[in-house]
Image (cartoon, grey):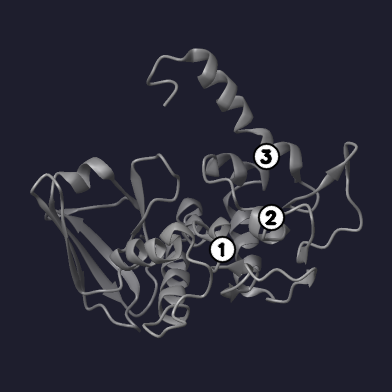
Amino acid sequence: MALMMNKQDDYGYFSERGQFYKNVFDGGTGFMRGKQNGSWVEPFDPASVTVFFTEANAWQYSFFVPHDIDGLIGEHGGNHPFEKKLDELFFGSSHTTGRQQADISGMIGQYAQGNEPSHHVAYLYNFVGAPWKTQMIVRRVLDSLYSSRADGLCGNDDCGQLSAWYVMSALGLYPVTPGDPEYSIGSPLFERATIHLENGKEFVIHALNNSKDYKYIQSVNLNGKQFDNLSLKHEDLMHGGIIDFEMGKKPNHTL
């Protein structure tokens, strides 16, 4: 925003400040960590809930860099190590240590769907060439952590964020980076959904062969043409039209 307004000083200030997460990233452990007097706080347990993290632990906040995903991947050493770290997050133990924190809920491994810092993380597999894992995790969250019962949300719906995550993810699209007019592709929940745009146009999301078991995207067409991206630009959505997903039972590793 500052750059668009030609406020160069503000642009430089916030661009630099947006990189300060690297000051608390420990490359030796692969986690964000608390510091005191310039040194890492010891002992360190990434599953521990401490005063150094707000409503979370090191597992959850270590992925909370939505504004510089490529930079965070680089800090981990590239796509493969970062994918492995995501696997450890989602497929490890859900046990936490330290103090009790009610906001850490809706657990899949150390991923906490019940609180906002985790909400973009399932889509990060798209950025390391493993979109089928995004599709698998997103559908698992949609199917298991939401319901129409009175207790149908797995956490505190701050400003409607838990509900917004469901609406966007059910459409198969999610804005991973706030302010970036682009939607990362997940796994649409419905066979057909129509977005009635305020400019009078319609954008249709069609998922052929979609079901609970057929959750993996096999191919994508946008307005009848093959679409090879893992994200959809907002301007393309606002033009109206139709995006066709062909769904399958097994992951497509070439997508």
Say which mark, if any, is on residue 115. Answer: 1
| Relative to 133, residue 249 above or below | below
- Residue 237 percent coordinates (x, y): 21, 48
Q: Dot 1, crowdedness within 10 Å: few (<14), some or many (≥20)?
A: many
Give amino acid for label 1: Asn
Viewer-closest of 154 and 74: 154
Report, in whole angstroms, how far the alpha carbon at label 1 lies from the one at label 3: 20 Å
Viewer-closest of 27 and 16: 16
The nearer-to-camera label among 2 and 3 is 2
- Residue 169 percent coordinates (x, y): 36, 64
* 82 left or right of 2 in image: right
Q: Residue at x 60, y 70 (%)?
A: 90
Q: Earlier in the sequence, mark 2 or mark 3?
A: 3
Give amino acid for label 3: Tyr
- Which residue in the protein does label 3 denote? 21
| Relative to 28, residue 190 above or below | below
